[in-house]
Image (cartoon, helix red, strand yellow):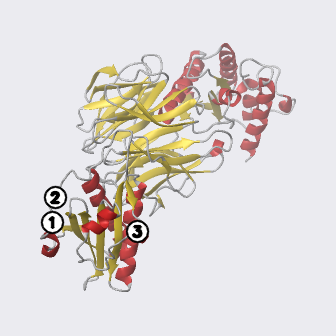
Amino acid sequence: MTSTFKMTLMAGAALLLAACSEEPPEAGGPGGNPSSIGALDPASVAYFQQTVGDRVFFETDSSRLTAAGQQTLVRQAAWLAENPAVNVVVEGHADERGTREYNLALGARRAEAARAFLAAQGVAPSRLRTISYGKERPEQLCSAENCWSQNRRAVSVVAGAPTS
Amino acid sequence: MTRLLIALLLILPALSAPRAQTNDGALEITVAGGEFEPISLAAPGFFGAPGAAADLAQRIRGVVLANLEGSGLFRAVPPEAFIQQIDDFDSAPRYADWQAINADALLTGRASIEADGRLLVQFRLFDNFAQGQVEGLQFFADPAEWRRIGHKIADAVYARLTGEGPYFDSRIVYVHESGPKGQRVKRLAVMDQDGENHRFLTDGRQLVVTPRFSPVDQDLLYISFERGEPQIYLLNIATGQQEILGNFPGMSFAPRFSPDGRQVVMSLSQGGNTDIYVMELATRRLTRLTDSPAIETAPSFSPDGRRIVFESDRGGGQQIYIMSASGGPATRISFGQGRYGTPVWSPRGDLIAFTKSGGGQFAVGVMREDGSDERILDASFLSEGPTWSPNGRVISFFRESAGANGAASLWSVDITGRNLKRLTVPGAGSDPAWSPLLP
């Protein structure tokens, strides 16, 4: 339940930011998230999600990492270097505007794009796994571009760190 | 599922004596074409001795008529219109009386409980204009199987009068959906083709998608996220036994049986790249069929097992291709506007069903194997995932409505585009897969 609540908070923050941005913002990032000020252990999962930024976004039917996405992944790699006991599952997701099986394949491409970038940044491949959810687990539920752009994502889910 | 004992019901001498030359083509309908008139069928009654037999007879008649009228190819003549009052299974039809009310065909039946407890059901089908009995069968079964007898009778009538293969005695497996859009609970469920005998096959603890029926028995392939990455599972719905198809490196998905049920064609993803493989079930030997950096998925065998239709984005966007069942070069067949995916070869080989997207809509349609004669059968915010009835005459698919409260629903449509209707399931449903005819 706690994690669902956090996800909702974070999504809300992302939506606020989206209103004044051309491209979907990577969650968190330098400057931080208002809800996280002063409260988080830098080694925690919550810090990784909210301050480092746990996800990157993609254009429609694309698995190419955007410049903003690459910046997020550079921060993720740096954080993972600081927290060597943490392993990562990179989840690849698609929006609802594709067929189910194609979207599973597309989600696999997106997860791999993020995984390969993290590995190239020096994260040991043995710490990185991928999983595609296709269109099965949208985070934003409306049927419009402002939701779909948030759902076309690769999320780095970390395990082995304190939760907050 | 027990096998029904079916035997030809001999034409009674009294009925066959004045019988005119049977005109085999008298009632055959034309599948294509703009004008269409359903076959009018009079079914005065299914008779039985008062009690259990009479009750079952009426219920079986109800199943027969619901199937035939539900196909969109038949119209039941209301009993008020009848001139001849048939009140006995062995009554001879007065064809002129039935012709006068434009009843093309006449169906009568009888049910009885035998001394050994078995249910015996007999029926006769008459062509009122050719003036003769054109079909007659009898069935022995456990009385609990009365619905299947109804399906069998409807199949016999349908096949005899339309010239199409039977399909009513079949089932549909699908993914039952509940819970909010971001956290859907998905369970495999199976039901008779008319929505009856619904039961769940999985409990919803694991996310499951895309079940596929074996064309020869009651085995299913489906995808479960049970181990994290999506993997293909094999489930026998009669015994409940299930197993993972193989320990593949990476994700395995998009499975379909070969027409003989001995092979599975599927997609495996490794390093983010998705290709098509085929596995022989007896040996679990795996053969790679495509090898490109493109997404190659949704493979489906031709009914003769010699070719495979699939989707690929090797040309830039999602399109449909055909290759040999042993791999090698592929020919693109979809050239319309938009993206094409989920190709499924009709069991009778004449058409390939697909999902097409573009212009903010998703549509389900059919085309020939050279891509010609494309026909869209349903379009909506999301219409996806066609599956063929065993006779290749009807398609089932799912829709999903837009928005945070959007929900999935199951539909069927005739390949002519007529008779679009929603299937009745308890709640929301997606990913239908039609079974072969039951054994």
Circles 2 and 1: CB atoms closer than 8 Å = yes
The residue at which mark 3 appears reads as B81
- Tell me the distance, in whole angstroms, between the alpha carbons under discs 1 and 3: 24 Å
The chain letter for the residue carrying disc 2 is B
Decide: few, some or many residues near mark 1? Use Cα within 10 Å; few <14, some 14-19, many ≥20.
Answer: few
N-term-proximal mark, 3 vs 2: 2
Marks 2/1: CA–CA distance = 8 Å
Q: Is residue B63 above or below residue B26?
A: below
Q: Amino acid at mark 3?
A: Ala
**Residue type marked 2:** Thr
At 72% from the left and 29% from the top, the residue drawn is A48
Asked whether A123 or B343 is in front, the reply is B343
Comparing B251 with A100, the one in front is A100
Mark found first going from the N terminus, 1 or 3:
1
Q: Amino acid at mark 1?
A: Arg
Q: Residue furthest top?
A: A67
Badges 3 and 2, same chain: yes
Depth order, front residue of A159/B13 = B13
* Circle number at residue B19: 1
Q: Residues within 10 Å of mark 3 (few under 14, many from 20)?
A: few
- Reading the image, the residue beneath label 2 is B22
Relative to residue A44, is residue A5 depicted above or below? below
Q: Residues within 10 Å of mark 2 (few under 14, many from 20)?
A: some
Q: Position of residue A142 (x, y in %)?
A: 69, 36
Q: Mark 3: which secondary structure?
A: helix
